[in-house]
Image (cartoon, helix red, strand yellow):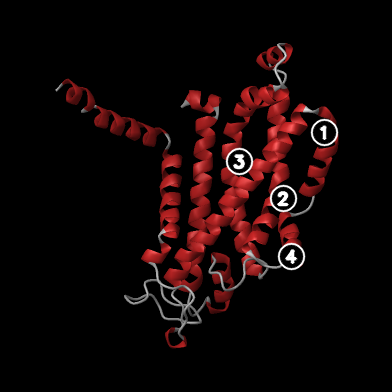
């Protein structure tokens, strides 16, 4: 009986904390819910959607109906199925690009921020990469290596690495001069231990926020490359491909562009809202005001 008496109030307390968190962080909740809904649709696409590749010219450019919830495109393919499967490519590209850029940029930023000898050489290389427009570099790499999802991920991730490296480097340059880092260095701690235990934790909050913006940017760049025909192969249903293939039917079949365009805008908006909320939450000054 005593055990039940102690555990029953836990659920109301958890619900109250959840309501307080949602009230204080509405952007995190809204962005997280939208992003979770899109991610859930992408994961369960084979269950909730039909085949996005099968086409039937008889059903071409049909408006939304009970048979086709979001209508059909110029080849008679189900727009709903293609939109749901398109979320897979967009989220895969966005999350993978963010992860690759974070890992490589973190290593480069830590090394350049702590070792001044590397800073003068490596960061000049990073500056050179940043001088090249990201979309042009991606188009060049896709043109040379061929159109595939892997090539698109690499092409988008390369321009993002210098931005992450410069962010981490700026944090390391500040933290390495703090008293507790100097004390660890004076006590004879190894460089690996200093970087891992004393400097790395300070880079995590800004990296989390930066990862959300990189993910949103990667999704937009992938859609732009697909729209220009330099992204993923045409057989893969992506939102950029759908918009590109349907641009000629904007006046007669606007749903073929409106649906993928709206999904693209909502996903980018959700990721940006999540990033803004995390920035406000992880920034000590803003968190103290809240």
Say above or below: 249 vs 238: below
Residue 29 in which image quadrant: top left
Number of residue marks:
4
Q: What separation in Å lies between label 2 and label 3 (alpha carbons)?
A: 14 Å
Q: Is tag 3's residue or tag 4's residue first in the polypeptide sequence?
A: 4
Within 10 Å of disc 3 (Cα), the crowding (few <14, some 14-19, many 20+) is: some
Q: Is tag 2's residue or tag 1's residue first in the polypeptide sequence?
A: 1
Q: What separation in Å lies between label 3 and label 1 (alpha carbons)?
A: 23 Å
Per the image, label 2 sits on a secondary structure element best described as helix
Q: What separation in Å lies between label 2 and label 1 (alpha carbons)?
A: 20 Å
Can you identify the residue that label 1 sits on? Answer: 118
Return the mark for residue 210.
3
Viewed as shown, does residue 256 lie left or right of 170? Answer: left
State the residue at coordinates (74%, 61%): 141
Which of 5 and 20 lies nearest the eye of the viewer?
A: 5
Looking at the rendered image, the disc whose residue lies closer to the viewer, 3 or 1, is 1
State the residue at coordinates (64%, 47%): 100
């Amino acid at each position: 009986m005593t055990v039940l008496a102690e555990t029953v109030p836990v659920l109301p307390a958890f619900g109250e904390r959840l309501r307080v968190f949602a009230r204080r962080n509405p952007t995190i909740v809204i962005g997280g819910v939208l992003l979770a809904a899109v991610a859930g649709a992408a994961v369960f696409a084979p269950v909730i959607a039909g085949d996005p590749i099968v086409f039937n010219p008889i059903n071409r450019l049909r408006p939304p109906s009970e048979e086709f919830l979001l209508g059909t495109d110029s080849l008679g393919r189900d727009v709903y199925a293609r939109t749901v499967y398109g979320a897979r490519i967009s989220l895969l590209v966005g999350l993978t690009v963010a992860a690759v850029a974070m890992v490589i940029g973190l290593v480069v930023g830590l090394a350049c921020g702590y070792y001044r000898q590397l800073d003068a050489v490596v960061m000049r290389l990073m500056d050179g990469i940043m001088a090249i427009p990201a979309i042009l570099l991606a188009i060049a790499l896709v043109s040379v290596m061929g159109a595939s999802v892997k090539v698109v991920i690499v092409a988008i991730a390369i321009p993002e690495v210098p931005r992450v490296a410069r962010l981490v480097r700026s944090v390391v340059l500040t933290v390495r001069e703090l008293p507790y880092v100097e004390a660890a260095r004076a006590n004879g701690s190894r460089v690996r231990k200093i970087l891992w235990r004393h400097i790395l934790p300070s880079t995590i909050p800004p990296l989390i926020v930066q990862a959300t913006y990189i993910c949103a940017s990667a999704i937009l760049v992938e859609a732009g490359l697909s729209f220009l025909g330099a992204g993923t192969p045409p057989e893969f249903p992506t939102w950029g491909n759908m918009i590109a293939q349907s641009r000629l039917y904007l006046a007669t079949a606007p749903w073929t562009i409106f649906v993928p365009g709206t999904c693209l805008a909502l996903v980018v908006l959700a990721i940006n809202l999540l990033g803004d909320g995390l920035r406000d939450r992880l920034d000590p000054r803003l968190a103290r005001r809240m």
